[in-house]
Amino acid sequence: MTGTHELNAAEPLTVAEAAALLRAGRVCAFPTETVYGLGADATNPDAVLAIYETKGRPRFNPLIVHCANLGMARGIAEFSPLALKLARFWPGPLTLVLPLKAGAGLSDIVTAGLDTVGIRVPDHPLALELIATVGRPLAAPSANPSGKLSPTTAEQVRKGFAGRVPVLDGGPCRAGVESTILAVTGDEAVQLRAGALARATIAQAIGRPVAVAAHDAKVAAPGMLASHYAPNARLRLNADRPEAGEAYLAFGPTAHAAAANLSPSGDLHEAARHLFSVLHALDATGVHRIAVAPIPMIGLGEAINDRLKRAAAPR
Ligand code: TXA
Ligand code: MG
């Protein structure tokens, strides 16, 4: 299988080694500011296939293409004036779905045959150095087995794939939830996925509100399955207090005995950063049921509630 390699996956990789693997058509996990990505050369169809194989992803959802800078991104997609304005958030946790440029050289599997492509420039020095060293855009979904929690540390990636995937270790991810995804068509922008960049922040930068795509919208993120980001434990959301047999995941000051607190001070950035790690850690204790405190729907609360809803969905 092209997705595995002969190096000892327990040994830390250097950027040069990671780049060599990627140039040779292998997959390699790398850090971003949001979550760890399972990367492959976006121009190499076999390498991109190895992502699906490694993740056990049941179908071909389009993948986000990670670029070193705006120049690399402009070689792949058509940028409208609005898209260029939004690209000022790069490097950063914003993915733009834009018209694919003719002759971009991307593997069809990356875009799942669509005529659009999801692109971002990640805000992480190791990711930027890696992409620049490879010299090609990297396709990368989150570095977790399909349907499992997204990883925010190298250790979670190693555990998730039982050491079969080489990982470039950049420490814990700063944002902790995936990028915000916007589809940009001409001078229209619609949010396909809430993420680490708050919708209100984007709206402020472009001087108008950003609509959220309807669930049945034609332009949807095909990967947005109802059940996703799933821990093994069952989740009960908006719980003001735990019931018998539940571990309580608190947010802000709480009078109840909590197994963990996403942010004791009620800071949504901190809660986003800790979300997946805390769920990983609670899961590892073997609890069967987790009651989660209400999270306000403002700022990053939109992304946190979205991930919690998916984690709690029946499966
Ligand atoms: O923060 C992130 O975005 C992380 C890091 C690694 O960059 N990546 C990530 O990738 O979350 P993934 O594969 O888990 O999610 C990609 C989402 C999917 O829901 C997919 O359907 C959507 O992006 N997407 C990608 N290209 C698209 C396109 N052309 N049109 C619509 N949706 C697209
Ligand atoms: Mg994912």
Image (cartoon, grey):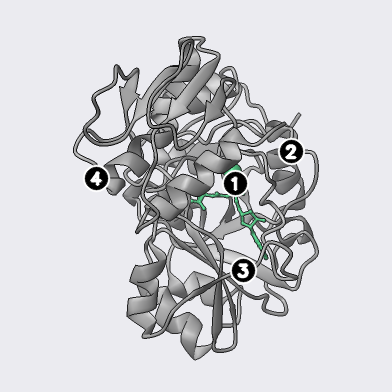
Q: Is the CB of mark 1 within 8 Å of ligand 1?
A: yes
Q: How many residues crowd mark 1 within 10 Å: few (<14), some (14–19), many (20+)?
A: many
Distance between mark 1 and mark 4 Cα atoms: 27 Å
In the image, ligand 1 is in what quadrant? bottom right
Q: Which residue is mark 2?
A: 57
Decide if residue 37 is in sight here.
Answer: no
Decide if residue 240 is in sight here.
Answer: yes
Looking at marks 1 and 2 on the same chain, the residue that comes earlier in the sequence is marked by 2
- Where residue 297 sits, quadrant-wise, is bottom left
Residue at horizontal 32 percent and vertical 51 percent from the top: 125
Q: Which residue is mark 3?
A: 213
Distance between mark 3 and mark 1 Cα atoms: 21 Å
Quick one: SS at disc 1?
Answer: loop
Q: Which residue is mark 4?
A: 267
- Where residue 257 sits, quadrant-wise, is top left
Q: Which residue is mark 1?
A: 141
* Quarter occupied by the N terminus: top right
Contact between labelled residues 4 and 3, with CB atoms less than 8 Å apart: no
Indicate left or right for 16 with 204 as reference. Answer: right
Residue at horizontal 39 percent and vertical 40 percent from the top: 294
Looking at marks 4 and 2 on the same chain, the residue that comes earlier in the sequence is marked by 2
Quick one: SS at disc 4?
Answer: loop
Mark 3 residue type: Ala
* Quarter occupied by the C terminus: top right
The numbered mark at residue 216 is none
Mark 2 residue type: Arg
Contact between labelled residues 2 and 3, with CB atoms less than 8 Å apart: no
Mark 1 residue type: Pro
